[in-house]
Each structure stands twice: as structure tokens, then as C-alpha cells.
Amino acid sequence: MIRRTPPAALLAASLLLTGCGGGAAAVQDHRPGAAGETSTLATRGSMPSAPSSPGSPDASVEALPQELPGLGPKTLAQVPSRTRQAVVVTGRDKDSPTSTVVLYERTAAGWQAGVSWPAHNALKGWSDHHTAGDLRTPIGVFTLTDAGGLLRDPGSRLPYDRSGAFTSPGTGFEGEPLAGSFDYVIAINYNREPGTSPLDWTRPLGAGRGGGIWLHVDHGGPTHGCVSLAEPQMKQLLRTLDPDRHPVVVMGDAASLAR
């Protein structure tokens, strides 16, 4: 399923202004203090191969939780009642760039958990009030409606925009190459217009609140604002997340999610 390509002017602006936190893509170095550091790209690294799909009948009916584990009442209240798929990203702590991801499927018996995947988030951790350039990932519950990438659609159920604008040159905070980070992306609906390409630059909250927050391919170091997973897991998410199940991402450090 292919999303319409944005107009030429929008696509050009997107190439410079979109991606993991809303910074420029065409830069040479993303390490702190490096000259020209304006990008917001994410992380790639060696991670486990894709686990089996959640929802397999390997947990007893009695064992399935009725609410998403680890979430407190404030967080749970933000999860739409119609949601049947939830990507839960749990940060190690408020200032840590490492996290874990579990895909949950809601069944008649309760929430079925998939395998836990290692992931990266922003360099400085998490924020309840994300702003452009703060190097923190926004905390909250956000819908997932749109996907895309540099590579051919691997079988995404979400609308998928394949474009050469999904480029990620340069190096990351730890000197790791960023190439391939945007091979596959899923837009997180933080300060963006749902139903558009991840490259769309519309920012309903204003540019100062950041944007271009994605799930995307991990390259082995912290991000500027996104959440990054190994390529096999990104492909699995693309093939599993179903618009008819109203998927969301629930993300933040463990203490914040437990509120």
C-alpha cells in the first residue's frame, strides 16, 4: 500500500527538516559538539532476530493481564478503548537512552505480550514536554497510522510511502554510521498530522515543540528523539500493526509510565 508522494516543495523541505526530532538530515556528524550538528537521526546495531508474533497461544487464559502491565492509571486513561495493539516502550530511567519494546495484542482473554526487544531512545532520555532540540523523547500515548522508508514496502499494513527522501547520512553520537536508519520508519503521531507521509512537515503544536518522531531502524546509539529497533523488528512491526486494530505506542521511562 503506497502513500501519495508529497508535492515537490514539501518533499524538499521534508528532506531537510524531518526525521527523529525534526532536524536536518544532510549533515556530516551528529556527535555532541560536532560542527554542523543539526540532525535528528537514530540508531542501528546488532540485535536479536525477529521473535514470534504476539498473540500465539503459549500463555494461559488466566495468565493474561486485563490491563497493559507497568502502566499506571494516568497512562492507561490515555489508551483509546478501541485499541487492540500497543507498542510499549519502557525506558531504563528518565535520563537514559536505552529502553525495551514489547508489542501487545489485546485478545478476548486480555493483553498478550510479545518478546521484549532492546531499543534506543533520545540521548538525554525522556520528557513530558518535548521541545525541538532538547534531545529527549516525548512521554505519552500516541497513535500509529503511517509508515514509509527508503526501501520497498516489506508488507506493511499501514499506508507506506517509499521515497528517496528517507536518507540518513553522517554519524551518530557515538561515531556510528547512520546509513540505513530510515530504511523503514513508522511515524509516531506526536505533533504531526495523521494520515500523511512521515515526511510531512505539518506541526499542529508549532515547530518549537519538535516533530519527526519515528520508530525506525537502530544503528547502535542514542537518537535525537525517536525510538529505534533492529531492522527485523521494524519489518515485523510493519507487517503486524493493523489500522483496523487502532495501534498506539505507549512510551516513557518506567516511573513515568507507572503514574
Image (cartoon, grey):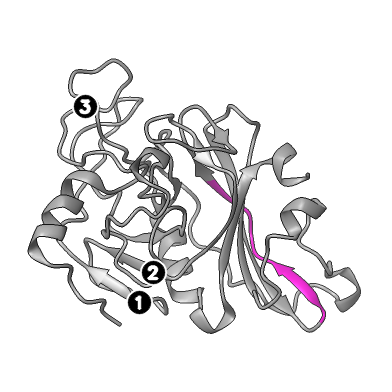
Answer above or below: position of 56 versus 216. below
At horizontal 58% and vertical 27% (from top left) the residue drawn is 95
Q: Which residue is mark 2?
A: 146
Q: Which residue is mark 3?
A: 29
Dot 2 falls on a residue whose secondary structure is strand
Give the numbered dot on residue 159: 1
At horizontal 29% and vertical 15% (from top left) the residue drawn is 33
**Farthest-out residue, left:** 8
Residue 71 in sight in this render? no
User: Which quadrant of the structure image shows residue 77?
Assistant: bottom right
Dot 1 falls on a residue whose secondary structure is loop
Residue closest to the eye, 77 or 232: 77
Q: Does the CB distance between marks 1 and 2 fall below 8 Å?
A: yes
Marks 3 and 2: which is nearer the front? Answer: 2
Q: Which residues are magenta?
A: 109-118
- Of pointers 3 and 2, the one earlier in the residue sequence: 3
The answer to if 189 sits in the magenta stretch is no
Residue type indicated by callout 1? Pro
Answer above or below: position of 173 versus 73. above
Q: Residues within 10 Å of mark 2 (few under 14, many from 20)?
A: many
Residue type indicated by callout 3? Asp
